[in-house]
Amino acid sequence: MNKVLLFWLGLMVSGWSEETVVATFNIRYASPSDKGARAWPERRKAVLEIIRDMDSDVVGLQEALWSQVQYLRPALPGYKWAGSGRDDGKKAGEFCAVGWKDDRFRLLQTGIFWLSDTPHTAGSKTWGNEVVRICTWVRLIDKKTGTSFYVFNTHWDHKHQGSRERAARMVAAQIDARQSKGDPVILMGDFNAKEDNPAVQYLTGNKVALDGGNGAEQWKRPLVDVFDRLHPGEDDRRTFHGWKGTPDGRHKIDHIFASKDVTPRRCSIVRDAKDGAWPSDHFPVRAVLQLPAP
């Protein structure tokens, strides 16, 4: 029998689709205060090389200004992109951009919401955070297998814990409200919160008290922390290294979560320097996931 036919029959029998590689990467915004090797013109090639090396089917970027998006998009011709600037919903402010391989996936839906009491008002912030925070989402379909799924890419506040807790509740509610509720979900981003933070604990199904609530609450459809599921005893899981490149410690604030119908296969923190310099003050996280067949 034809080997290709056998392969697809195997997928149908097993109930699983092809592996999907996803990655999240805070590329550090192009700050005028960053000098030398930290300046965007000096490290942008390294950022590009890291994205190429990860070879992910879907990638979520955080802190990407429009000038950085303009550089990366044409340099990654195999990807299509979704996302808008957080300040005006157009080009102003940082993007939480989502990219996907165009030869494998087709975009079905996309959207953006602000982490505030007015999630559809561009530039809104109402929870005590000084910085505008957003989440970009896409619904993709695999052109070969017909598997459709959602990807949410977000960046939570770096200072205000109450904002992070309310963001957790809102992101969960937006996931629950997705149009195709049977589709698997991948949530990624820079959460500015470690695994033991109540905001992250809420996403993974723990009963916690969140800002603006009335006592302990628990999400009924929690997600799986992919890295922690595969490396539960790993102590050196730092993703924010502050340009030092140190891997030690548990300061892991960049996460990939997936719905329980997704099987994590592999997950790693990518600690690659380029020409002796760090592409960003964050390490990206890369995961290989098995999504259920349609």
Image (spheres, rainbow, N blue to C red):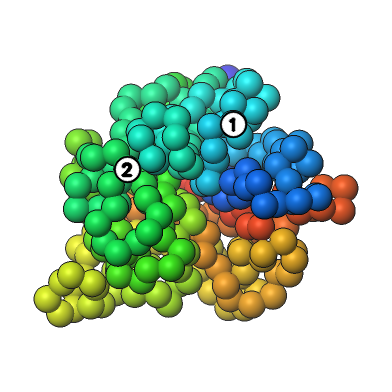
Position of residue 285 measured from the top left corner of the image (x, y, whole percent) = 59, 54
Which kind of residue does numbered mark 1 sit on?
Ser
Position of residue 235 measured from the top left corner of the image (x, y, whole percent) = 62, 78
Residue 114 in the image: above or below residue 225: above
Mark identifier at residue 46 = none
Query: Which quarter of the figure has residue 167?
Result: bottom left
The residue lying at 25 percent from left, 53 percent from top is 116
The residue lying at 23 percent from left, 40 percent from top is 121
The residue lying at 46 percent from left, 40 percent from top is 93
Give left or right: position of 71 versus 61. Answer: right
Is residue 182 something that shows in the picture?
Answer: no
List the residue tagged with mark 1.
67
Give left or right: position of 224 versus 45. Answer: left
Which kind of residue does numbered mark 2 sit on?
Gly
Q: Quadrant of the C terminus?
A: top left
Label 2 to label 1: alpha-carbon separation: 19 Å
Residue 197 in the image: above or below residue 118: below
Outermost residue, front side = 33
Q: Quadrant of the N terminus?
A: top right
Give left or right: position of 2 versus 219. Answer: right
What is the secondary structure assignment of the residue under circle 1? helix
List the residue tagged with mark 2.
123
Count of marks, rendered view: 2
Q: Nearer the viewer, residue 10 or 126?
A: 126
